Amino acid sequence: MQYWSPGSIEEAVGLLSETGATTRALAGGTDLLAQIRIGGQAPERVIDLKRIPELGRIDVDAQGFRIGAAVCSAEIGEHEELRAAWPGVVEAAELIGSTQIQGRASLGGNLCNASPAADSVPALIAAGATCTLAGPDGRREVRVEDVVLGPGQTSLALGEIVVDFRLPRPQYRTGDAYLRLIPRSEMDIAVVGAGVCLSLDRDGHCTACRVALGAVAPRPILVAGAGEALVGHAVEGDALAALSAAASAATDPIDDMRGTRDYRIRVAGVMARRAAVIAAERAASRV
Amino acid sequence: MSEEAKFRWIGTRVVRPDGVDKVTGRATYGADFALPDMLWGRVLRSPHAHARILSVDTSRALAHDGVEAVITSQDLPDIPSEEAFVGEQPTNFRELSHNVMARGKVLYHGHALAAVAATTPEIAASALDLIEVDYEVLPHVLDMPAAMAASAPSLHRDLEPAGFAAGATVPPNVSRRIELGHGEPDQGFAAADVVVEREFTTKPVHQGYIEPHACLVQANPDDDITIWSSSQGHFMVRAYTAKLLGIELSKVRAIPAEIGGGFGGKTTVYLEPLAAQLSRISGRPVKMVMSREEVFRATGPALGTRIRVKMGCKQDGRLTGAEAVLHYEAGAFPGSPVQAGAMTMFAPYELEHVRVTGYDVLVNKPKTAAYRAPGAPMGAFAVETVIDELAEKLEIDPIELRLRNAARKGTQAPFGPRYREIGCVETLEALRSHPHYTAPLGPNQGRGVALGFWFNAGMQSSAGLNVNEDGSVSVISGNPDIGGSRASLALMAAEEMGIDYEKVGAWIADTASIGFSDITGGSRVTFATGMAVVEAARDVKRQLCERAAAIWEVEPERVKWVEGEARLEGEPDREPLGLVDLAQRAARTGGPISGRASLTARGVGMAFGAHICDVEVDPETGRVEVIRYTAVQDAGRAIHPSYVEGQMQGGAAQGIGWALNEEYVYDEDGKMCNPSFLDYRMPVASDLPMIDTVIVEVPNPRHPYGVRGVGEVPIVPPIPAVVNAVHAATGVRYFDLPLSPPRVLAGIEAAADRGA
Ligand SMILES: Cc1cc2nc3c(=O)[nH]c(=O)nc-3n(C[C@H](O)[C@H](O)[C@H](O)COP(=O)(O)OP(=O)(O)OC[C@H]3O[C@@H](n4cnc5c(N)ncnc54)[C@H](O)[C@@H]3O)c2cc1C
């Protein structure tokens, strides 16, 4: 196996675009190395993205945040401004694995591994994050919900990598939250994950709401109907129940050793509702 | 004088002899050994749950560069049936041989059927793919009702079921029927005011030791075999390896490594005979290390069970009768702990009428192995849940109900004998007076209690005690130390000799360097090997007195060993002779001073534990969180209280995992779906609260220091304590493990539907 550690995006894209040898991008390796160990089949070339400066930094400007795709969860958790602005995204990143895993695991890896249960992805989708892709044909900006197509499948073209994630500065009275259900308290894979981002007007009525779910369909899903159910209402009572019902109705989960289909359908609504309540509290506490 | 004041070392919390090595990472475990020229062994495992092996072609693997040996069952002797004389669960050498290497048929997914030795682990792994096996896939059975159905495929055609009346119809795949008890339960039920009858199921669970099985074996041309491996008994490893290879025990030396957990799962072997045979053929040392996936798929988990329990009770809380039928999954070969389950389940109670019938059932799953108090936690789950329901119906406090029926000295146990000194009542009373029992609970929270029993084992032990040239003392035993036994043995030696603990070294000797010792199992080492250490120390003290007498030229009877020195009776002015003096003069007074003892330990102290568990249940997700937990246990006497508490906490943690989330999940083809710690959900540290412990001491009068076994009892009460707590929090009774969130939520919803 060859290990490459390019210092620039162009170099990395060049290496990943070459055909002939099986080649994989490497960030924290917490998915890739585990898969190599279990599956036994190692790629012929591994291209480590961690030395590329642009992928390893969080930048903040007037527009908002740029999170390098290879920044690890621990660093995301320690970024005070990001924490304050997007607590839901940060709490999702901080749920990944354990302290040790979080010293390696990146948002880019979490997204490109394309697991339906990836924790940061519903939070990023709810927050309306976009990502920058770089490939042989240059750069493009896509919405996070457009990257994962199904288990292990992404819309990235050959040679394309995720460079960064972009989040605006949160608008007036906007808050986000992410919750997941796991049977244990950590070191587990989401049975259901729910990310919610919503905005309130002065009277506490919801003006916008995005609900995204993980682990309940072949890929993380944005449930437009669940968000719409809340818009125009206070975050309580029937409106929350409607959000919950819409979330459950949008799911198409599988039965497996981590949870049954029926269970996931029910709990998706519960998690979405609870995340909405937390997001609303955060939104209300902002001026 | 208080009990404690009698002792200088017993009951103190000294640093364990193996502690520094373990926290600095220097302790050597099974996989840490290497020899020059060593090969790596790997095992080929069955992809089918049940299949006939039509042919195995190893020629391509053998021809592969770097492969030095390949074996199948044809390379191991076809040994006759013989009951094994070591180990913990009932085993037969022939069946064990067929378990470590399938012969004729594979009986479960993951069953070993060939092994290779190669110069690197990678070559060994790729050589496995070159072995060509032709299977005839057979129908398989995964659960007991299916295994016992009239049309079920048989795992073993030559099975001779035991315990059935002549002419009785025996369902397929039942290897044994047992029955025990006394009185007439039906009479008891007729006299009862309330009768509760329930059926329970539990899933197979793994012991989950952190260290996978590993060994290094070197066979010499003269057929001497040396084994380095971690196990719960190197004499067991020696016997199994020798028997399976058809050679004499004297040809094999087994050297114990440190052990990274066993919990009963390392009371048998999987790799050592294979590595030995690969080494004999290749002429080179062979090392084998299992992956976690192999550990899950092919090493003995604890069994799944189906248990029906019926109990009757008077309005005043007196139990009138009890009856149970147990079905215990043995796995692919006979030998579940159904007997132990039957014996222990009602053991905490005084019962005039009690009867238990049990069946040992074969299924196409790995051969089960012992797991802490083998067979008992499942029985306790059933009985203690029924007792909880009786208490609820009778509106009697659940601890009070247990106390009214608690076994005491003289009570006839369901398995026959009358109890001698036991601490069942004392344990329950300590539980009731613990502040935890009356602490307030919040919304969605509930509290459960449960009681548990385990016999503990005696068996055979050997120990040696050498007085070193400088007057320090080395204690040598033949039992791998899993739970701090070296510290306990050294403490007893220091106490007995009247010397400082720091002067005592404690070591575990290989099979050629100490007398036979049964496995480290049955919570027996501090009790039984401790007894041997005390005897060896007394032997040494006798010799020391004789040496002093020779120096003083007096009758040996006049010399007494007091506070670490020989004193001459009646002559207080005579300068005493200490260990250093006597050690230095040993050459001139008769040579080295060493004591030894080999014994069968009798007078085992049976033990009881009782636990309180508080849970909080999320009513919308069914997720259960244990928020407070207290374990109380009669230890007889805690030689080293920290290690007793550690055993209690560890047992509680494992029992909580068993109750809430651990289970083997199989697909239709009989393949385990969750062979990793990610999806086989043992609790992680953050899942558990601090587990509070209370040690009760009702000394066992038949041990020099009052010891009872402590390692197994604490896994008996947790399952029902958790399940009863979940009932208290939700109002729902659960009869099937585990109480994973989907199951708990389904129960809550079903109850709501019934209520609506
Ligand atoms: C013990 C353990 C616990 C875990 N717990 C969780 C959990 O709770 N929640 C959860 O969601 N996940 C969990 N995971 C999975 C994993 O840690 C996360 O998915 C993590 O975010 C992956 O990031 P990484 O940087 O390690 O990715 P890597 O393993 O380096 O890469 C993952 C995949 O993405 C590709 N890739 C990586 N970066 C890029 C990029 N910039 N552009 C294009 N392709 C890229 C790689 O080629 C690979 O296919 C756990 C893993 C382990 C081992």
Image: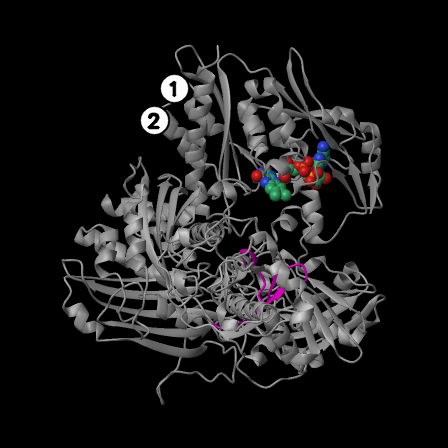
Label 2: chain letter: A
Are circles 1 and 2 on residues that touch, CB within 8 Å? yes
**Residues shaded magenta:** B459-487
Residue B141 seen in the figure: no
Label 1: chain letter: A
Left or right for B505, reference A227 = right
**Residue visible at 36% across and 41% down?**
B617
Q: Is mark 1 within 8 Å of ligand 1?
A: no
- In the displayed structure, B379 sits above or below A212; it is below
Q: Quadrant of residue A249?
A: top left
- Classify mark 1: residues with Cα within 10 Å, few (<14), some (14-19) or many (20+): some
Q: Nearer the viewer, residue B20 or B474?
A: B474
Task: Assess whether residue B302 is covered by the magenta stretch.
Answer: no
Q: Nearer the viewer, residue B417 or B382?
A: B417
Left or right for B28, reference B567 = right
The residue under label 1 is which amino acid type?
Answer: His
Task: Indicate the position of residue A109 as horizontal and vertical percent values.
Answer: 67, 36
Q: Quadrant of the C terminus of chain B?
A: top left
- In the displayed structure, B403 sits above or below B438; it is below
Which quadrant does ligand 1 occupy? top right
Task: Indicate the position of residue A97 as horizontal and vertical percent values.
Answer: 59, 39
Residue B683 seen in the figure: yes
Residue A238: give its label.
2
Q: Which residue is mark 1?
A: A233
